[in-house]
Amino acid sequence: MPTLIDFNHGISAIDSEFLRPLLDAIHLVVEDGKAAIGDAEARHIFLREGMRELLVSAALAHGCPLRGERLLEILEIDVELNAQGLGIWLAEIERSLGS
């Protein structure tokens, strides 16, 4: 039976046992009753979308006058870098749990 690693906050990894145990994982993310499952690329897309929503909401809550595409354009590098950082952090946790 595949191993399930719970990272809390709605993020879990399911060991796919591809070639050997703890080599590759399929990620499951659940938030507000919605679930996303996939590999590292799908996880990055999910993290990027979530980070975009979070940063846009924060900018608007702080009174940012920009809207729509202009706001997304300004935030895009921060969205991408934060999503990459979260992905690296999750990968490190997976490696530490697997070793």
Image (spheres, helix red, strand yellow):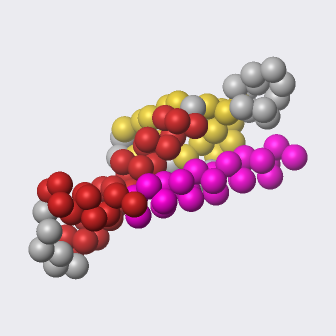
Residue 21, quarter of picture: top right
Report if residue 53 lies within the magenta region: no
- Depth check, front residue: 9 or 95: 95
Residue 26 screen position, x and y as percent: 61, 31
> Could you say where residue 87 lies in the image, as x and y percent from the top left?
58, 51
Q: How many marks?
A: 0
Identify whether 13 is placed above or below 84: above
Tell me the chief SS of the magenta region. helix
Residue at position x 19%, y 70% from top?
60
The boundaries of the magenta stretch are 78-99
Side of 5 where 72 appears, left or right: left
Q: Position of residue 58 (x, y in %)?
A: 28, 70
- Residue at 44%, 55% (x, y): give it: 80
Can residue 1 be seen at all in this image of the molecule? no
Q: Is residue 51 left or right of residue 74?
A: right
77 sits left or right of 90 in the view: left
Quick check: 14 above or below 68?
Answer: above
| Residue 42 drawn at (x, y percent) | 49, 35
